[in-house]
Image: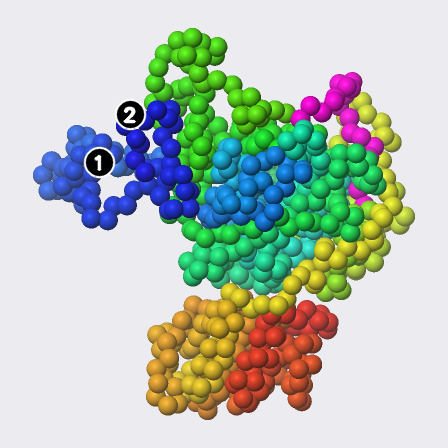
Amino acid sequence: MAIKKGSDDSVPQQENEKTSGLTAHTTDSTGELMTTNHGLRINDDQNSLKAGERGATLLEDFILREKITHFDHERIPERVVHARGSAAHGVFKLYEPLSSVTKAGFLNDTSIETPVFVRFSTVAGSRGSTDLARDVRGFAVKFYTQEGNFDLVGNNIPVFFIQDAIKFPDLVHAVKPEPDNEMPQAASAHDTFWDFISLMPESAHMIMWVMSDRALPRSYRMMEGFGVHTFRFVNAEGVSSFVKFHWKPLLGVHSVAWDEAQKISGKDPDFHRRDLWDAIESGNYPEWELGVQIVPEEDEFKFEFDLLDPTKIIPEELVPVQRIGKLTLNRNPDNFFAETEQVAFHVGHVVPGIDFTNDPLLQGRLFSYTDTQLIRLGGPNFQEIPINRPIVPVHNNQRDGYMRQTINKGKASYHPNTLGGGYPAQAKASEGGFTSYPERIDARKVRARSKSFFDHFSQAKLFFNSQSDPEKNHIVDALSFELGKVKTVEIRERMLGILSMIDKGLAAEVAFALRIHVPQDPELPVNHSIPADGDPADFDSLIFESTVNISDELSMANTPKDSIKTRKIAFLAADGVDERSVTTVRDALQSAGAVVEIIAPRQNYIVAENDVQISVDHSFLTAASVLYDAVYVPGGTNSVATIEADADAVHFLNEAFKHCKAIAADSAAIQVLEATYFGKKLPADFSDQTVLKEGLVVVDDPAVLSDKFILAVSQHRFWEREKPRKIPA
Ligand code: HDD
């Protein structure tokens, strides 16, 4: 929408419907003539102005200089953390009013569709780094509500490494590439990270999550989100309760294997970005339900952990998650830089009815976000960038600064005033004016941490104990990998001491892989971030008893596995393929919502046995097994012979087997499976039991095959296959 001339609004407003597609300053050049930035029509954009055809370029060429100058200034500093990200627009719709706990308008009116912009990210890597790093994923949601913007700036892991924001720069310095040689990129597997972690026992719980497959999502669309901190809700009567926010993906929570993640990083480092983009472009809108765990204020001290400690979850067995509404992402950004790169989130962006607690990590974040935008976006007017603007008008006496867009009218830029009629006026609480929850604080000023924050291991144990056997094995493998990359032996040993406080078996298995000993009877580790005059004994870790020993929600093995929607399935085929063997299975998979791609020795098309042309999506050169969820080999004598003899095709299947994916073949193509590494182990008959346990489907009737294959793909992975633990690919 263009800026309204003569409008009374002091800030040019964008379309009220963020979802409608156009925001202020949106430009579409279709059918337009080229101009300079000042509107002068350009006649020649191919040649600079020269003294003669072969002559020197003239300083006079203001068109050249404008273009090059703009280009030279195209980059802005990337985010200090969460630099690599992808985003989408969408809407949030509430199921039931939450008036009993919060007065927030968008959580009270079920008729409102609140526009949102959501940015997912990795934490450690640079802007151009791979999507598939082992890392926490950012899950930041900007709700453009009728009462101003509310930002829920969370992660896909419900706890954090540290308890106090003052340690955040240390954590980030430790995980980022090492400062002398800037290696490794987007990876925690190096000495400085584990040096720091091994001295910070409070990170034990988070480390369990980051070493689990949660740090390797299959898709942004298949990961949970968490607000991490305990926040406050406040209702219209001023009664407050504590709240933890959750995002639950409707497609379930799924991950890839570590070997696969590393290979995807080479084959398609944009894997998650592409997946999000493609899903939205094809109308498969990603969906999450917003969940809340609510704790009445009087129950603050009811738990064995401190609600203000961001290294703790509230197990869902103690406080169930109520699902209160649905988030749907339905539109890709028009311009990556203008929207995804320039969006500025801040935990301090709240609306009436939502407030903070004294979680010391949250308190520090309340400073950091605006501060970082000032340097990253170049000044104090970043809230005027279209993606950051609220959908409600902005009126205040803030003025000027770099790149100010708003043309404020009138003389009065102060309050109180009479020259401006006393406006803008303060809003009473009854008019939506924000009032902070009047929490009582009466304390000495200290640099200290509550003893209730010193239990670092009970929930790390809870997480580990709640995992399935394959998930536990993956944690062992991840720690063996990460510590295996650490060069300093003392750091490895110190970490084994920490691991033994979580689980002795876990420590022993990692020690076995590293071929070093777990320190005998390690003392509870001391938190080394103690004040200069502090007594280390005052910082000893404690172990509290957890009232919950296993929490089902913590294991991805318990996630819903009832759909193959948006799963990518590769068909390996060549000339001479049996057309029915392709189309029957393809139709069945597509009607169940999957995406099918045909991969052949060459691009463009293959010719089936019956001379029908079938389009090819990729050749073996441009596709890779790691980019698909499952594989199928159709019948047809010549196709089968070609695929069986193609080393890339056989490798494709070997990798799919190694990564525990569903594999199907028309029984006329069984010889292709026999040519693989796992061919030797094929069961004699492929019953439903085989599908359920091993994910291998071989049937001669394509219709029957489809049903069984769909069942297998919906299981996501058959991790039990890893039992022998050594599968080459
Ligand atoms: Fe942070 C970005 C999430 C602790 C300081 N953070 C950032 C983003 C997410 C989070 C999702 C990216 C937002 C986007 O997509 O633009 N951060 C978290 C969570 C934390 C956390 C869940 C712990 C519970 N962060 C944290 C602390 C500090 C920061 C303790 C500093 C004291 N975070 C920042 C930052 C960033 C940021 C430096 C970098 C870019 C930005 O803010 O806009 O200010």
Give the spatial CA distance, label 1 vs label 2. Answer: 27 Å
Left or right? Give the position of 171 relative to 376.
Answer: right
Amino acid at dot 1:
Thr
Left or right for 310, reference 669: right
The residue located at (45%, 12%) in the rendering is: 422
Q: Secondary structure at mark 2?
A: loop
Residue 349 position within the rendered picture, expressed as x and y whole percent measured from the top left: 55, 32
Question: What residue did someone put label 1 on?
Answer: 36
Q: Nearer the viewer, residue 442 or 506?
A: 442
Question: Looking at the image, which residue is at 57% across and 25% down?
Answer: 430
State the image coordinates of residue 102 (x, y, percent, origin top left): 64, 36
- The boundaries of the magenta stretch are 437-457
Display colour scheme: rainbow
Quick check: is 156 in the magenta stretch?
no
In the displayed structure, 145 sits above or below 441; it is below
What is the crowding at mark 2: few (fewer than 14 residues within 10 Å), some, or many (at least 20)?
few
Q: Is residue 443 magenta?
A: yes
Residue at position x 80%, y 37% in the image: 299
In the image, residue 484 above or below residue 362 = below
The image quadrant that residue 178 belongs to is: top right
Percent position (x, y) of residue 33?
18, 43
In the picture provided, is 337 more to the left or to the right than 509? left
Q: Position of residue 594 (x, y in %)?
A: 50, 69
Q: Residue furthest left?
A: 52
User: Badge 2 is on which residue?
Assistant: 6
